[in-house]
Amino acid sequence: MGSPSATAPEIQAQIRQQQVILELGQQALETDDLDQLMHDVTVAVADTLDNEYCKVLELLPDGDEVFLRQGVGWREGLVGSATVPTDRDSQAGYTLISEEPVIVDDLSDEERFSGPELLTSHDVVSGISVIIGSVEDPWGVLGTHTSDRREFTTHEANFVQSAANILAAAIERAKKEQQLREREAQLNVATNAASIGLWIWDVQENVFTADEFLAESYGMDPEVVTTGAPIEAFFEPVPGEDRDEIWDQLERALETGVFSAEYRVRNADGDLMWMVSRGEVEYDGNGQPVRMHGAVTDITERKQREQEIREREERYRDLFTSMSEGYCVIEKVDTPPEKPTDFRYIEANPAFEEHTGIGDVTGRTLREVVSEEFQEWSEIYERVVRTDEPVKFERELVTQERVLECYAFPVGDETDEQVGVLFADVTERVKRERRLENLIERLEASNERLEEFAYAASHDLQEPLRMVSSYLQLIERRYDGDLDEEGKEFLQFAVDGANRMREMIDGLLAYSRIETDGDPFEPVDLNAVLEDVLDDLQLRFEESGGEVTSDTLPTVAGDRGQLRQVFQNLLDNAIEYSGDEPPRIHVSAERHSKDRAKWVLSVSDNGIGIDPEYSDQIFEVFQSLHGQDEHNGTGIGLALCERIVERHGGEIWVTAEPGDGSTFAFTLSAASDT
């Protein structure tokens, strides 16, 4: 360390150091370029102390490293990129927690910390490092070093600390300026976003100044507005009918101290804009007005919304009074806890009395008007308010022989808890519905009687047919040798007719029992159903040389026995009408394109096909497109299929062309567990 008594050269050096500090301090006050200042400080410190190196290390946000922001003497590329750790074993870390300058005489003998790679790689031996800022709020480190061993004096260490203090002050000032700029930017953004302009009126000099927002809004020259002009100039864009009102407000404000006015101005495009201007007056010691300062806001959109609301209210009022439906609004009455709950009619349109027969309800309570139905109305009101959902219900006015369809729904805001009720006269519709219901009931009863008749008729015809068949067989056995060929042919016709009649009666009996004898629906695996049907038709397929292919079929909700009958009838038809070629049949399934809860089952064949003209006729009872000499059948199989499918909530149809095969398709509901 240096000796306590200073020599002449040392005094000269101290004077030089003080001069450098003064120059750096002056530069710090005159510049906004922090990096240039940091660079000049490192140059000045290194030159003044005759050192090879000087550096400014900035503490990074994570606090684990410092960054070589500026410096002199270091190898090219390190300034602006090199970092140094700040742990306590490093000189930088030690400096950041030191109140006093850290002086190193010989880095190789240093026991307080180790030299970082930045120093050792440059053969640094001695140096001084000081904190920039404070231990409580450090910004970084200022350090100067030499590769020769050297004992630095306290004055030299204080010189480095003074340079660091200049940097700390400049950094703090820059932070404050940056914060000020940010606040100004935020204020500008806020005022622009809110369409706000600021103004000042020097009352005694009659000079009015404002910002560019006001100039743009008023359609005035920004230079005139920002430099100032007589207040009368700012009234030129204001329509005459608004101008007098503003003057009156200004004159009153000079007495009351507060100014507020809404008025219109015409901008540079000639459009009228609504503005609101508010201000306060400053007075001198004698109570005379000196200036008024305030803000102006563009409220054009607000005025437009208010106008739209007024127009909507007018339209609503017109609709309210002219609509044919009755309408009223009710709300809960604030009653003491000891009194029963009640509701009040807020308003009702003229049609309300027409529909309900109750007039002049506005202001009256529900207990007064509908005392007998009060409890039900109370529950409807509470339900609407609680769920915020509309409630639909009907009211039958017995004395008026009318039925009203009512809709109760929330109106007003969350605090109002008001409920509107719309009354529509649906008397004619209800009458039609009731007539339709009666007709359906009669049709159902008629169908039931027809089914009973069909069952009874078909059942009672069984016995006479058995007798006819028995006697025909007896004649055939007893008189076979006595009949000629023509007689035998006649007898065979009679036997065939009786057999066909029995088959038709059996089919009619089965048709009449579709609803009454059906089993409850359950999940049905159609793959198993098809397999059973193929077993039953095995002999027919062998005789015809037919073949059946199938996709994997779904599990549906239905009556297994009846669904088996559908597949059996469709496959049997495909064999019967296969033509000259062996039947080729394919059974497939796919999800319904519009209702994913349903399946579409299809049975396609390569048979003789059907003329599309008869695609509906073939599903009628006892309808056949071919004579008995062409094809066997009673003409009831497809009718049975249709009735079974309809019982299952589906529909059946055919797609076919003559000579090009047929595809019978029908829909079934998927089982609930699939």
Image: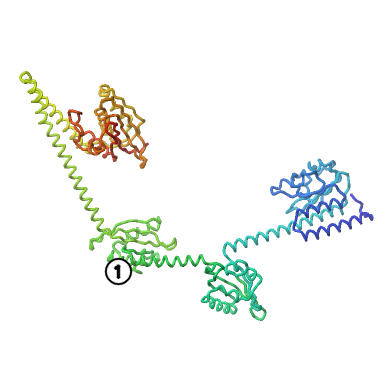
x and y, in percent, of residue 365 in the image: 34, 67
Residue type at tag 1: Gly
User: Which residue is disc 1 drawn over?
Assistant: 359
- Most extreme residue toward the top is 481
Tell me what residue is drawn at x 65 percent, y 61 percent.
183
For the residue pair 198 and 179, the one nearer the viewer reads as 198
Above or below: residue 36 compared with residue 470 = below
Quick one: 603 or 104, which is closer to the camera? 603
Q: Residue 417, image x and y in percent?
A: 41, 61
Q: Which residue occupies 32% across, 37% down? A: 557
Say if 10 sits above or below 525 in the image: below
Residue 632 image position (x, y, % from top left):
20, 28
How many marks can you see?
1
Helix, strand, or loop for circle 1? loop
Residue 184 appears left or right of 158: left
Q: Is residue 320 left or right of residue 456?
A: right
Question: Looking at the rendering, in which quadrant would you find the C terminus?
Answer: top left
Quadrant of residue 106 in the image? Answer: top right
Quadrant for residue 181, please give it: bottom right
Please indicate whether residue 538 sits to the left or right of residue 69 in the image: left
- Given residues 88 and 51, the one toward you in this image is 51
Q: Residues within 10 Å of mark 1 (few under 14, many from 20)?
A: some
Query: Is residue 555 shown above or below 483?
Result: below
Please, which residue is most extreme toward the left here?
Answer: 482
Q: Extreme right residue here?
A: 8
